């Protein structure tokens, strides 16, 4: 103990630089600890953000899906206006002419979008089981469908029946008038049936009649015939 007191007495002047060193060490340790604390907080924030982003990458919101469904359904409605209405199709025959590149591209895009369409979410669902990559492919396919339909429709409305000869255009005009009679509920069943047969004969070799359009008119005529038998 005496030795320590003697050392302190003889070398008292060293207390100040040593104290400074110790104080510096203490300050450095405090700064280091504070930096570690901030680093831990930042790391926790980064992990939380990464988990949120990962969740976004593994789920597709119902809102996103329904929005794309709505766009898809609207496009189908536009196409059905041609597919189900033979009179409209006669006026714009390019919409089913697969020799036309724009028409072919439209129909391919339509089929592709339908193939990629996922199952609709159930009522009350807030998330779906549709993988984001699958949804992205579907949304892109619907966008391609929209662009292809718009291009085909613009061209069909621009050209109308321009690709047909005068004689063929006369046949198309007769067919359009006959279809009007065949669809007229005020005409007799026999008149409607006869008009439809003549219309199909006029269209033969000129326009490919969509099955749905033919089925719709034939079903109307069949109903008229049944009612006629019952009178």
Image (cartoon, grey):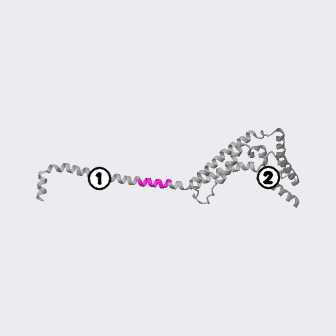
46 drawn magenta: yes
Comparing 230 with 77, the one in front is 77
Horizontally, is 33 left or right of 152 in the view? left
Residue at 84 percent across and 43 percent down: it is 171
- Total residue callouts: 2
Q: CA distance from mark 2 to mark 1?
A: 87 Å
Query: In what element is the residue under mark 1?
Result: helix
Q: Is residue 147 above or below residue 221?
A: above
Horizontally, is 200 left or right of 53 in the view? right
Q: Residue furthest bottom?
A: 230
Q: In the rendered image, which quarter contains the C terminus?
A: bottom right
39 drawn magenta: no
The spot of residue 140 in percent (x, y) is 61, 48
Comparing 113 with 173, the one in front is 113
Residue at 75 percent across and 50 percent down: it is 83
Comparing 183 with 13, the one in front is 13
Horizontally, is 128 left or right of 28 in the view? right
Q: Residues within 10 Å of mark 1 (few under 14, many from 20)?
A: few
Residue at 74 percent across and 49 percent down: it is 81
The spot of residue 198 in percent (x, y) is 86, 49
Magenta stretch, main secondary structure class = helix
Comparing 68 with 110, the one in front is 110
Residue pointed to by mark 1: 29
Quarter assignment of residue 47 = bottom left
Of the image marks 2 and 1, the number of the one nearer the N terminus: 1
The spot of residue 153 in percent (x, y) is 71, 43
Residue pointed to by mark 2: 214
Q: Residues within 10 Å of mark 2 (few under 14, many from 20)?
A: some
Q: Is residue 151 above or below residue 31?
A: above
Query: In what element is the residue under mark 2?
Result: helix
Residues in magenta? 43-53
Residue at 70 percent across and 43 percent down: it is 102
């Amino acid at each position: 103990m005496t030795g320590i007191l003697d050392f302190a007495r003889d070398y008292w002047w060293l207390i100040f630089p040593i104290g400074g060193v110790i104080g510096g060490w203490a300050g450095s340790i405090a700064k280091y600890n504070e930096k570690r604390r901030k680093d831990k907080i930042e790391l926790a924030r980064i992990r939380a953000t990464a988990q949120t982003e990962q969740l976004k990458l593994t789920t597709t919101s119902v809102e996103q899906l329904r929005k794309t469904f709505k766009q898809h359904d609207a496009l189908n409605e536009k196409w059905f206006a041609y597919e189900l209405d033979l009179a409209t199709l006669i006026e714009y025959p390019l919409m089913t002419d697969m020799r036309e590149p724009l028409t072919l591209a439209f129909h391919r895009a339509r089929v592709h979008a339908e193939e990629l369409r996922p199952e609709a979410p159930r009522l009350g669902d807030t998330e779906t089981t549709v993988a984001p990559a699958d949804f992205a492919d579907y949304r892109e396919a619907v966008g391609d469908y929209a662009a292809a339909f718009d291009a085909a429709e613009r061209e069909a409305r621009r050209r109308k029946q321009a690709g047909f000869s005068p004689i063929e255009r006369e046949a198309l005009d007769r067919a359009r008038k006959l279809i009007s009679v065949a669809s007229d509920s005020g005409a007799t069943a026999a008149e409607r049936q006869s008009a439809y047969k003549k219309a199909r004969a006029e269209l033969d070799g000129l326009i490919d009649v969509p099955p749905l359009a033919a089925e719709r008119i034939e079903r109307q005529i069949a109903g008229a015939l049944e009612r006629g038998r019952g009178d």
